[in-house]
Amino acid sequence: MIGNYRALSALTTLLLLSAEASATIVRFETAQGRFDVNLYDKKTPATVANFLAYVNSGAYNTVVFHRSVSGFIVQGGGYTFPGALPLGTVTARAAVVNEPLLSNVRGTIAMAKVAGNPNSATSQWFINVANNSTTLDTQNGGFTVFGEVVSGGMTVVDAINALPTFNAATGFEELPLRNYTAANLTAGVAITDQNLVYATTVSVLDSNVDSAASLTPVTNTLIKGSSSTSTSGSTSSSGGGGGATGVLSVLGLGALALGRRLRRR
């Protein structure tokens, strides 16, 4: 009888965990508006499960968009706004295996990672505001796309990307800010919640694992045969503390034409 109870309890727990991990549409509520992301549960299961672990634990509530590069990406997932500066940090879980099956086209969300280590993605992600497939689909083993912004949500993402960015005292070189000017920065005006761009909540909107069935994600056809497809677990030499925030810095994209780097910092 006890054995049956334990088996039933284990099964119940498994079902609950499966239900939690099956969430497919996630909603970001920001000061710039809300947007929804449809996750590709079946195409990139490990990455989606990793992302949802942060969502379901509440780790992404008040998550800050700490980097924006015009016409390229907006990035978040590493820092939160606890009500005042300095920013808090999202506690990273174990790194997730790289799943570079889909292309980094406009509107997709992908994982950031450490340079030279394809399997180093943890909490940080970025949204492509342009078609970045030429560089991001092959660099560092390819950047794993695991969902896409839907239902007109790119209007909100574009609004974030259009904000001016600052090399602020917070230690971020491309920090997007609202209601803030270069004159404010020069005068030492404090950055507050009225200036930062962050999601008050990131939550599951729809737990139907088949909600992406009607979507047609673009396959990453560039990764095949690329010399960048190594899946070794080597640690990047650039993974030490850096900047005023004393956190991991850098992940290079090799976006040479843009002269930009997408980094986990």
Image (tube, rainbow, N blue to C red):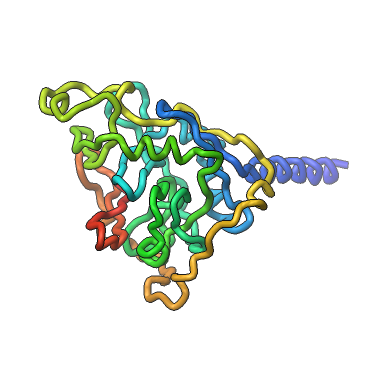
Q: Would residue 125 be seen by someone viewing this image from the given angle? A: no
Give the x, y percent position of residue 31: 41, 26
**On the rendered structure, is 44 left or right of 91?**
right
Is 92 rendered above or below residue 226?
Answer: above
Counting the numbered discs, the total is 0
Is 5 rendered above or below residue 30?
Answer: below
Residue shown at 32%/48% (left/top)?
71
Give the x, y percent position of residue 19: 69, 42
Q: Spot the residue most to the bottom.
A: 225
> Would you identify the image quadrant in which residue 141 lies?
bottom left
Q: The N terminus is located in which quarter?
A: top right
Give the x, y percent position of residue 185: 15, 28
Give the x, y percent position of residue 35: 50, 35
**On the rendered structure, is 195 left or right of 99?**
left
> Would you identify the image quadrant in which residue 207 lies?
top right
Q: Spot the residue most to the right.
A: 1
Residue shown at 44%/37% (left/top)?
155
Q: Would residue 173 be seen by someone viewing this image from the given angle? A: yes
Residue shown at 25%/35% (left/top)?
164
Residue shown at 27%/24% (left/top)?
179
